[in-house]
Image (tube, helix red, strand yellow):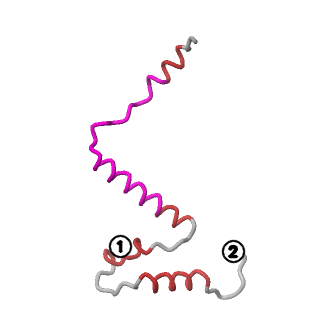
Amino acid sequence: MKTSSRFRLATAAVPLPDVSQSAGALRTRLARLARALRGAYLQVFGIPDYERYTAHMASRHPGDPVLARREFFIMAIDRKYRGSGPRCC
């Protein structure tokens, strides 16, 4: 079967993966990507992120006590569902 020249040009332009990276560096990059995707997912759906909270407390409020994981989620759920009356969303 004969391929068109346009197909050959398109496939020639696709960059090949960089195989010079070590497996450890690739694993590190994939782990960072997974953490970033997890954080974005949690933010989009409004799920509290304890790891993000602890990082924030360590960087912005170093002298303040950090809540335990269970207390953090109780506070987050209370904050999310307490209200001053009926609401549509």
Q: Position of residue 80 (x, y in %)?
A: 58, 80
| Relative side of 63 to 68, left or right | left
Give the camera-side residue of 21 and 83: 21
Mark 2: amino acid: Cys
The residue shown at (72%, 76%) is: 88
Q: Disc 1 or disc 2, which is closer to the eye?
A: 1
Query: From the image, which quarter does the N terminus lie in?
Result: top right
Q: Earlier in the sequence, mark 1 or mark 2?
A: 1
Q: Is residue 28 above or below residue 86?
A: above
Which dot marks residue 89? Answer: 2
Q: Position of residue 79 (x, y in %)?
A: 55, 83
Q: Is residue 52 above or below residue 78?
A: above
The residue shown at (33%, 36%) is: 18
Q: Is residue 34 magenta?
A: yes
Mark 1: amino acid: Ala
The residue shown at (54%, 17%) is: 6
Q: Which quadrant of the figure has residue 86?
A: bottom right
The residue shown at (40%, 85%) is: 67
Element at badge 2? Answer: loop
Which dot marks residue 43? Answer: none
Residue stretch in magenta: 11-38
Query: Which residue is label 1 attached to?
Result: 55
Q: Position of residue 78 (x, y in %)?
A: 56, 85
